[in-house]
Amino acid sequence: MNLVEYNGKKPLLGKRVYVDPTATLIGDIVVGEGVGIWPGAVIRADEGKVILEEGVMVLENAIIEAGKGTTLTIKSGTIISHGAIVHGASVGRNCVIGIGAKILDEAIIHDHSIIGSGALVTPNKEIPSKKMVLGIPGKITKDLDDTDLANSRKEWDMLNNKLDYYIKIRGVKY
């Protein structure tokens, strides 16, 4: 596992956290309880600060980077999917950032929203709660209903079960 100190700041990990040995965390990062950081993920806070709240799941090859002098927060229960990039933005609770999606500087994604695979949320864009965003540039395509939100929760539950498996079987307890 690569936990890299930068300018005297190093990642701080909560309880019941899994960080894959191939993931890299650099600088001023706070990782909450029950967070999973999967293979190849890179989280950089060498110019700012990154906060991953309780239960955030950062999947394979995702990149999270704080902008210079900013704090990037990803709130509880959110999934940052395979190859997604969050750069200098904020993401609310229980969101799904889809495969290969990009969220750029100072964008704000509010609670329970889904950014679809490959979508691009441009700088300074604000996405209200319970919205689906698709396309390049990303546009709101629908309001999310209870079924959509339940499906997002099922995906998070599956990842949370895998987190327990990796912690138990691989003996990874940080």
Image: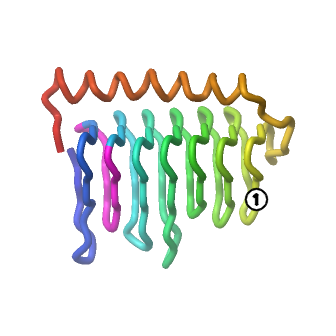
Look at 39% across and 42% down and name the residue there: 41
Q: Determine if the magenta segment contains residue 7.
A: no
Residue nearer the viewer, 99 or 129: 129
Magenta stretch: helix, strand or loop mostly: strand
In the image, residue 154 sits, relative to residue 48, either above or below, namely: above
Q: Quadrant of residue 113?
A: top right
Q: Which class describes the residues within 10 Å of circle 1: few (<14), some (14-19), or many (20+)?
A: some
Quarter of the image that includes the C terminus = top left
Left or right of 40, for residue 79: right
Query: Magenta residues, as a range?
Result: 21-33
Residue occupying the point 68% across, 61% down:
107
Residue found at x 51% / y 52%: 75
Which residue is rendered at x = 53% and y = 35% of the image?
81
Number of marks present in the image shown:
1
Instruction: Examine the structure image and report whether residue 24 is included in the region drawn in magenta.
Output: yes
- The x and y percentages for residue 163 are 32, 29
Q: Quadrant for residue 51, please give it.
A: bottom left
Asked if residue 7 is positioned above or below residue 171 in the image, the reply reads: below
Q: Quadrant of the N terminus?
A: top left
Q: Give x and y (percent) for residue 30.
A: 34, 60
Q: Is residue 109 left or right of residue 35?
A: right
Find disc 1 in the rendering and name its residue: 126
In the depicted view, which residue is nearer to us: 120 or 169?
A: 169
In the rendering, at what x and y percent does residue 124 appear? 73, 65
For residue 24, side relative to residue 74 (left or right) = left
At label 1, which amino acid type do we have?
Glu
What is the quadrant of residue 56 in the picture? top left
